[in-house]
Amino acid sequence: MDDGLVSWLVTISIGGVALIMRLWNLSYPSKLLFDETYYPKDAWTMLHQGYEGTWGDAKTINPQIAAGTSNGWTPDAEFVVHPPLGKELISIGEHLFGMTSFGWRFSSALFGTLMIVLTIRLARRLSRSTMVGAIAGILLTLDGLQFVMSRVGLLDIFQATFLVAGVAAVAADRDWFRHHLADEIRQRGQLSLAGQFGPRLWWRPWRLVAGIMLGAACAVKWNSMFVLATMGIVSVAWDVSARRLAGAGRAAWWSILKDGVPAFLYLVLVGAVTYLSSWGRWLSSYSTMMFGKGWGGPHADPGLAKVVGTPLAALWDYHVQMYNFHTGDYMMHQTHAYSAHPAGWLIMQRPIGIDAVNDIKPGQEGCDAVGDTCLRVISGMGTPVLWWMAAIALAAGIVWWIAGRDWRF
């Protein structure tokens, strides 16, 4: 049987199992968990009015939502610190299934499954092996952190899926460019570029897809910009490598400029347009919400407003406020029980507690303790053996990449 067909059968099979695992009993626990106290409620008001409304005190409102009451909000605009796309995606499930735990987690389950499918295809492309792609998909399907993030109404799974899609598109663009560069050389009756720079391929469909996906990731959380910048550098570096392999010699270095400028347009400009489009409903609702908390006209720079219009100037001011929140003195002096230094992420030094229920009586919720009570905990924790081995594999891959000049690593 053709390997391409087999690879898709494997991808669909693993993806199907992953989807069932993520949808099974998705509504449990039927309450708002961890930061679900923010995003599903924001999504619900966005669904009804195009922007985030204001809810009452969480200690009062959250139990009401769990009991089926979802009208405890006002149309006054709420200040939020993340872009809208992730919440827009959560609202799709809420539109289909209502303001229920299944509804606000449904989109997460779909995107968690899509992330696994994309990982299978990416791993297969990098390794040229369907088996390696399948192994990658199975491991991700069974990973604890990915599983939990696929079953809660938070933003992280949407960001991660868009990032994987963007990286996969950049890898696909690498192959596309090399194949089309080789075709151009053959059509010219040449065996190599013979020291010349070679043709400029303006149309790069996979690079366009990468720009859209990475821009969408930024429209979920800002820190996706670091991945966008990295993929831009990697993409141009692969162009240089492809031209050198095709015999361009030193002329291949012109790729930094000649291919780099189009790459900037495809990734950064397209990404920026994608990001801005995610604020479309915010902009269209601007005249309604600007009076809610005073955001908008009174704070927008008059000079900027004359150039781009008051709504866009107000959106810029809103971004300044968001940036100041993330980087200002208030946030710098805050502490969090689950704060973890990035250096410890790969070894799961500090897992995140999503939910905990104490003192479960014997015979209730599966507790079979004798003379004691049980504790139920949901943790955002990767499968330890998988993550620890992955950390070792990452280090080995870097060494292999540098020492062996093997681009797959």
Image (tube, rainbow, N blue to C red):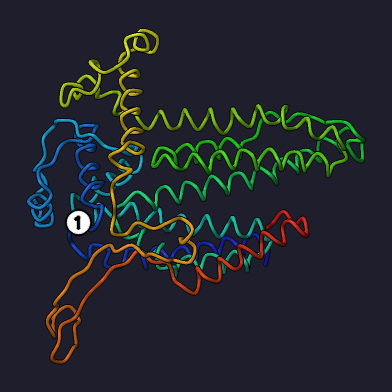
Q: Is residue 247 left or right of residue 15?
A: right
Q: Is residue 301 above or below residue 115?
A: above
Q: Kindly identify the amino acid type of the residue bearing the numbered disc 1.
A: Leu
Percent of width and height locating residue 160 = 45, 51
Q: Is residue 52 above or below residue 339?
A: above
* Location of residue 320 (image quadrant): top left
Seen at 15% across and 37% down, the residue is 54
Q: Quadrant of the C terminus?
A: bottom right
Seen at 69% across and 28% down, the residue is 202
Helix, strand or loop status at disc 1? loop
Percent of width and height locating residue 267 = 56, 34
- How crowded pointer 1 is (Cα within 10 Å; few <14, some 14-19, many 20+) is rated as many
Seen at 71% across and 41% down, the residue is 237
Q: Is residue 258 above or below residue 302?
A: below
| Count of numbered labels shown in the rendering | 1
The one of 159 and 69 positioned closer to us in this rendering: 159
Q: Is residue 259 left or right of residue 150?
A: right
The one of 358 and 55 positioned closer to us in this rendering: 358
Q: Quadrant of the N terminus?
A: bottom right
Q: What residue is pinned by disc 1? A: 32
